[in-house]
Image (spheres, rainbow, N blue to C red):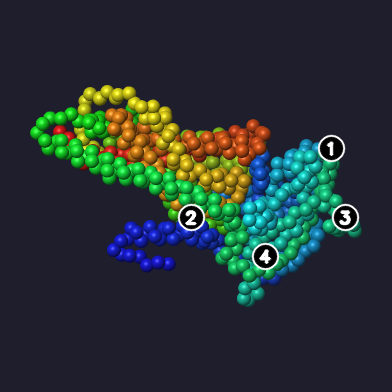
Amino acid sequence: MCSLNRTNPNKAWVAVLLLLCATVSSAFYLPGVAPQDYAERDPVPLYVNSLTPMSLVQLKSVISYDYYDPRFHFCKPKGGPEQQAESLGSVLFGDRIFDSDFDLLMKQDEVCKQLCITEPIPKEDAAFINQCIADEYSLNWVVDGLPAAHRRQDDRTNTLYWSIGFQLGSGGKESPVLNNHFDIYIYYHERSGGKNRVVGVLVAPSSKDTKIEGGKPVCKKTNEAFRLNPDGGSKVVYTYSVYWKPSTTPWATRWDNYLYIQDPSIHWFSLVNSIVIVFFLTGMVAMILLRALHKDISRYNAVEAQEDVQEDYGWKLVHGDVFRTPSRSMLLSVFVGSGAQLTAMVALTLVFSVLGFLSPSNRGALATVMVIFFMVFSCISGYVSARIYKMNGGEQWKFNVVLTATLFPGMILSSLFALNFFLIGSHSSGAVPFGTMVAILGMFALISLPLSVTGSYLGFKKPRIEHPVRTNQIPRQIPDQPVYLRSIPSILMGGILPFGAIFIELYFIMNSIWFHRIYYGIGFLFLVFVILILTCSQVTILMCYFRLCNEDYHWSWRSFLTSGATGVYVFMYAIFYYFNRLDINTFTSTVLYIGYSAITSVLIGIMTGTIGYLACLVYLQRIFASIKVD
């Protein structure tokens, strides 16, 4: 794609990464599964997945249900449904895939084929189904690894695109009708040797009060819609038609129809907005470092060269206190280590996504890789925590090893397991099975824990990070600070700019998660992540410089919390999103949404806080090493 300049490899790698990001934003990906060829009349299995709430305007629930939940009374294959093997990430994200009784044969059209006639549906189940229709639940099918979709029009551009899933019914709460007939359109690509590959699946559901004549269903366009009797006793006739459509779309690009980015101009606006913030901060940091800071260092060194004894002034006044051990240094080191672990996990996951190895065709690959990276990078957590704790003069190294390995993972796992009980209580398919929970705990015990201990051992074996100036025995008194440099105002101000750099992209990610849509602006996300790192670093350095100039040397926790306040704004935005984009009225859904949002906000806060703390530490080491101190 490009030639690398051997004399300047860093610039060459930057160019390659930028080119990859731009390519991915145009839906470039590497397939995650091998293609399957079908001869004419070969059976093509149709699998069914969980039912999920899917709304265009406001989401009414966050709970998903198994397709074969007995309350739905869907048609089951003979001998009972058989669950398909799934990856760890697929299970964690709520996929529950089973086989079905649909009979699809390559290139063989079917018209009004009967699937089954249900038993009379009880009153309670009829009410449950009608409530799911009112909450706009959708069916999710899978054919040859492709999700079944329906056509939808983009209101802004009037472009038709494929939206994954299709409605369980329509009519809302006032007059719900159940979709019991499905027109299935399967697009295939012909290859040499009579082989064919599935490249697209569309479903057009409809509601028909189908009658049985001579043992066969009679499907007419004039059929009235089918409504469940609220008092129970209704029998549902499920039918389907299959239409095979030749397509020129090759197998390698079959996912392009599903990867529609609504209004990409907003993504570009988000990116430009973030870049403007970074340029603004870079300009301020450059002004401070190249002008004010350079003048300060030159002036301090010039004063030292003079014979007359003069008073120190400016940030040099605190040289004997700036590297004083912070309060609760144990907790700080554990948080910084965990943040380094998260940063490495997110960075490498995004790199893999940019390179196309985590395409949506490999179901659950993204979540699986994130879990594995999180476990493996616990060695980084242990190493960084040990180095920071030893630098701050900590002596309880055994307690640090244990706390680093267990505190943060324990908080996250216990919170997720607690929320899982709410899913179990609501009979949701999103509830993680007991076996999967045991597997996760096993991975933590066998992978994360030993690697964290190993990282801590290597960190404590390293020499202590030495500071360029000595620390005075008696702490210096800190004068009264301006309002904008006091703890809470300065921390809250510091979190605004990093959040401002990501909030537009955050909106699309939340839409993807809660509305069950594919997010594939990975190129945009990668660049926004880089911008987030730069913004956190620069904001923290700026606030640290201003505080030092006002003789406030308590920078350790302040630097962590300044950029870490991004997590507070993310949570506040999640609350705003709850009232603006969701229409949830049940206690369980509310608890799940608030719980998952809180966990996400804490993860972002710890990650951004770590970036700010480490940037500030490097900055202080450099500037105080540049001055002459007795």
- Residue at 49% in and 53% down: 524
Q: Residue 576: name its quadrant.
A: top right
Q: Amino acid at mark 2?
A: Gly
Residue nearest the observer in this picture, 30 or 10: 10
In the rendered image, which residue does mark 1 sit on?
A: 231
Q: Amino acid at mark 3?
A: Ile
- Residue at 70% in and 52% down: 166
Q: Disc 1 vs disc 4: Cβ atoms closer than 8 Å? A: no
Q: Nearer the viewer, mark 1 or mark 4?
A: 4
> CA–CA distance between discs 2 and 1?
53 Å
> CA–CA distance between discs 3 and 1?
23 Å
- Residue at 53% in and 41% down: 438
Q: Position of residue 287 (x, y in %)?
A: 31, 44
In the rendered image, which residue does mark 3 sit on?
A: 212
Q: Disc 2 vs disc 4: Cβ atoms closer than 8 Å? A: no
Q: Earlier in the sequence, mark 2 or mark 4?
A: 4
Residue nearest the observer in this picture, 53 or 547: 547
Residue 478 visible in the picture: yes
Q: Which mark is residue 187?
A: 4
Q: Nearer the viewer, mark 2 or mark 3?
A: 2
